Amino acid sequence: MLKSYVQKGRMEAGCDEAGRGCLAGPVFAAAVILPPRYKNKWLDDSKKIKESLRRELREEIQEKAIAWAVASCSPEEIDQINILNASILAMHRSLDQLNPKAEFILVDGNRFKPYEDIPHETFIKGDGRFLSIAAASILAKTYRDDYMEKIHEEYPGFEWNVNKGYPTKFHRAYLIENGPSPYHRKSFRLKELQQIQLPL
């Protein structure tokens, strides 16, 4: 069972992102404040959970959370400020929406920038250690997947409904053959990728 909090008696928000390693689409982030006594044996790092369970957990989180929010940064913003800064900005945007506000922020990973005057701490593999970060992981992942499935209808050839914008063998090969879409991140060395001869 994951931990419920770092310190008892304060409003702690877990933060995580999804889509950082993708070639296409926005990066999404979520912030979640869970009740201090909340427990869920199924809640874990979203990458370890089947899609059907992630969907069920999303409904549970949204129903039971004290506050939750999801935000994103566009491919254009990623190209302008780089993926790390865009991931952090998306987290800040999700924190902006929380009501009530967090008193402490738990962040998955090892990089973050101070948000307002609220103290924070980073946790490597935090989405497998704390319920609030795992909950944020679930929301960020499922909302991003929804977005990628939506834009798949516009550019079905890239099969974003399957790969969600990650650099799978098929995605890279199709990108080499057909060039990038408006949703691709131009700063992710797409020109170099297009020069690679991948076996089909």
Image (spheres, rainbow, N blue to C red):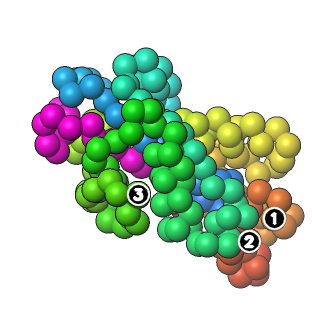
Give the residue at x 84% y 47%. Answer: 155
Rendering coords of residue 142 (x, y %): 54, 35
Disc on the earlier residue, 1 or 3 = 3
Q: Which residue is mark 2?
A: 186
Q: Nearer the viewer, residue 15 or 100?
A: 100
Query: Which of 45 and 8 lies nearest the eye of the viewer?
Result: 8
- Is residue 177 found left or right of 135 in the rendered image? right
Amino acid residing under circle 2: Lys
Q: Answer left or right for 42 relative to 168.
A: left
Three-letter amino acid code of the residue under disc 1: Pro
Specify whether 79 is left or right of 87: right
Mark 2 residue crowding within 10 angstroms, few (<14) / some (14–19) / many (20+): some
- Inter-mark Cα distance, 3 to 2: 31 Å
Location of residue 38 with respect to 164 vertically, above or below: above
Question: In front: 197, or 15?
Answer: 15
* Element carrying mark 2: loop
The residue that label 3 is drawn on is 116
Between marks 1 and 2 in the image, the one whose residue lies nearer the viewer: 2
The picture places residue 102, in percent across and down from the top left corner, at 34, 42
Do tag 1 and tag 2 residues touch (Cβ < 8 Å)? Answer: yes
Q: Residues within 10 Å of mark 1 (few under 14, many from 20)?
A: some
**Disc 1 and disc 2: Cα gap in Å?**
8 Å
**Tag 1 and tag 3, C-beta contact below 8 Å:** no
Determine the residue positioned at 76% across, 79% down: 191
Question: Of helix, strand and loop, which one carries label 3?
Answer: loop
Residue 180: mark: 1
Question: Can residue 55 be seen by looking at this rendering?
Answer: yes
Q: Magenta part of the protein: which range?
A: 1-21
Quarter holding residue 133: top left
> Given the current orientation, which residue lies at the most extreme front position?
117
Is residue 16 located in the magenta-colored stretch of the structure? yes
Which mark's residue is nearer the viewer, 1 or 3? 3
